[in-house]
Image (cartoon, grey):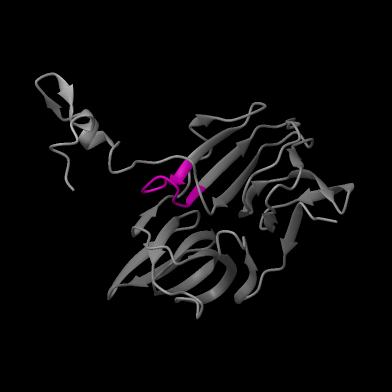
Amino acid sequence: MSKAFSHFDWRNGFIAELSPEYPSYLSSWNKYAFLQPNEKAQIHDTHFVYVFKGNAVLSYGEKLYPLVEGAYACVPHSGYIAGGEGIIITKQNYNGMFMIGGPAEHEGRLKYIDGCTDSLLIPPVMLGDPCLNLLYFPADIDQTMHTHPSDRIGVIMSGKGKCVAVNNDSKELIDLVPGMIFCIHANGEHKFQTPYGEHMRVLAFHPDSDYGPTHQFHPMLNRTIVDGVSANQLPEIQTK
């Protein structure tokens, strides 16, 4: 017996611990939130933040950063958010790179499947790192049933639709509405639909990736040319 799709109520604080293979936990906030390392963390935690409603201010490193509705951020170790409402996905024992972006664009820039598109809002800094995605579903989409090798954690940003999920060996039809916080569990069979004549936008956190730069393959190294040869082919000059 297994469950493909779970959804959660909003609250000010911790919601659930997820993705045991890539330890992560989920929180939400209204009015304020403390971003702090989990007691299980040995090195760092990094917090992936999305402002669902209203405007907020992030306090980080003794500076204040405005976060408008629809903004997203990657916040290593600790911080504080005041105002607005949103979700926080915390990746344990991961030292991310501080960044703020948004508000998120309307549609994705990368073609995905079945007419949908995707944008990497916060890309992997290195191969295997977590990432934060915007998924865009035009009206009248009926996705192919599929799975993911790790949890997908997020929120319905706008629009509405349905999820067909195989929960406990039977198909369940779940309404997707703005503000629904969800987890698609690793290897859970599911698909999204938009049968209501309107688009849907989804924020999705991946705790891992099979994409990103490595020390031996990244744009700076690849496009450094020595006598017509890329430096990625010259281990003798690469930084050790």
The answer to which image quadrant residue 99 occupies is bottom left
Q: Is residue 147 left or right of residue 37?
A: right
Furthest residue to the right? Answer: 170
The answer to which image quadrant residue 95 occupies is bottom left
- Vertical relation: 40 (above or below) 94: below
The N terminus, quarter of image: bottom right
Magenta stretch: helix, strand or loop mostly: loop
Furthest residue to the left? Answer: 227
Of 237 and 33, nearer the camera is: 237
Residue span colored magenta: 120-132
Q: Is residue 69 left or right of residue 11?
A: left
Which residue is drawn at the image coordinates 70% and 47% (left, top)?
A: 187
Of 61 and 124, nearer the camera is: 124
Counting from the top left corner in percent of width and height, residue 92 is at 49, 67
Counting from the top left corner in percent of width and height, residue 190 is at 76, 42
Residue 121 belongs to the span the image colors magenta: yes
Counting from the top left corner in percent of width and height, residue 14 is at 61, 75
- Vertical relation: 230 (above or below) 235: above
Residue 142 belongs to the span the image colors magenta: no
Q: Is residue 219 left or right of residue 154?
A: left
Count numbered badges in the picture. 0
Of 172 and 44, nearer the camera is: 44
Q: Is residue 124 left or right of residue 117?
A: left
Furthest residue to the bottom? Answer: 39
Which residue is drawn at the image coordinates 47% and 60% (left, top)?
A: 48
